[in-house]
């Protein structure tokens, strides 16, 4: 069956729905499709799966994303895969594809962050373990920092654009851009395990 909507036509049939819309005179309409089904039959119960497809420029369906119920209030999301093994799995067939975290800024010291929280509090907005991609004085001088500990994390080391490795909250150069190990002073018992 089909129903007219503001953006186009909604089509429905058993376990499937899709929406089309487009501009008059163009070769193909834009279209999105959702498929609802089960991916595992567990005794008398089935675990649900929802797939999202988008039409490409040849009017074929490209798989975009899959949601799968895993039980115990867990859902797995797959991008580029219909069988996600973890809470979020991104699969690509192209080098350089994958996940990109972008901070919309050209200001020095602004950063994009990948955070880790081990807590039962869903509203934990200040993770104390993180990796940051930091804007340098220019795009070619961007660098990476790693933080752990405390309530919000403290920078432990950084890798500069030229490959220099620095450690500590007041960064001390350990390995320079030529890969020379520099004098880092006294290493006390317990500093290295």
Image (cartoon, rainbow, N blue to C red):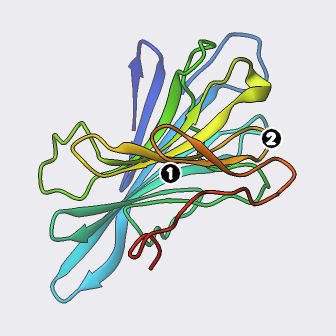
Question: Relative to 146, does residue 18 appear above or below in the rendering?
Answer: above
Residue at the left extreme of this rendering = 121
Mark 1 in CB contact with mark 2 (< 8 angstroms): no
Q: Position of residue 64 (x, y in %)?
A: 56, 48
Q: Secondary structure at mark 2?
A: loop
Quarter of the image with the N terminus in it: top left
Residue at 75% over, 28% down? 141
Question: Relative to 86, does residue 103 appear above or below in the rendering?
Answer: above
Q: Secondary structure at mark 1?
A: strand
**Between 93 and 22, the one nearer to me in the picture:** 93
Quarter of the image with the C terminus in it: bottom left
Q: Specify whether 81 is left or right of 73.
A: right
**Between 108 and 37, the one nearer to me in the picture:** 108
**Between 24 and 94, the one nearer to me in the picture:** 94
Nearer the observer: mark 1 or 2; the answer is 2
Mark 1 is surrounded, within 10 Å at the Cα level, by few (under 14), some (14 to 19) or many (20 or more) other residues, namely: many
Q: Position of residue 164 (x, y in %)?
A: 73, 46
Residue 30 placement: quadrant:
top right
Of pointers 1 and 2, the one earlier in the residue sequence: 1
Q: Specify whether 147 is left or right of 175.
A: left
Residue at the bottom extreme of this rendering = 43
Q: CA distance from mark 1 to mark 2?
A: 37 Å
Q: Position of residue 95 (x, y in %)?
A: 79, 55
Q: Position of residue 80 (x, y in %)?
A: 60, 57
In the picture, the disc for residue 151 is: none
Residue at 47% over, 25% down? 9
Question: According to the image, label 2 marks what residue?
Answer: 162
Q: Specify whether 157 is left or right of 155.
A: right
In the picture, the disc for residue 65 is: 1
């Amino acid at each position: 069956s089909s129903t007219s909507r503001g953006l186009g036509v909604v089509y429905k049939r058993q376990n499937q729905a899709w929406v089309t819309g487009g501009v008059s005179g163009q070769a193909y309409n834009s279209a999105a499709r959702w498929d609802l089904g089960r991916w595992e039959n567990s005794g008398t119960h089935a675990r649900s799966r929802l797939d999202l497809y988008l039409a490409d420029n040849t009017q074929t369906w490209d798989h975009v994303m899959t949601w799968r119920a895993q039980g115990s209030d867990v859902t797995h999301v797959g991008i580029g895969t219909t069988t996600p093994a973890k809470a979020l799995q991104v699969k690509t067939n192209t080098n350089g594809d994958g996940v990109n975290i972008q901070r919309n800024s050209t200001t020095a010291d602004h950063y994009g962050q990948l955070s880790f929280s081990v807590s039962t509090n869903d509203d934990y907005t200040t993770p104390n373990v993180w990796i940051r991609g930091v804007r340098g004085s220019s795009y070619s001088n961007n660098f990476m920092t790693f933080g752990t500990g405390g309530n919000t994390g403290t920078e432990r080391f950084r890798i500069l654009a030229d490959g220099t490795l620095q450690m500590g909250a007041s960064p001390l150069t350990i390995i320079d851009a030529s890969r020379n190990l520099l004098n880092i002073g006294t290493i006390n018992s317990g500093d290295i395990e």
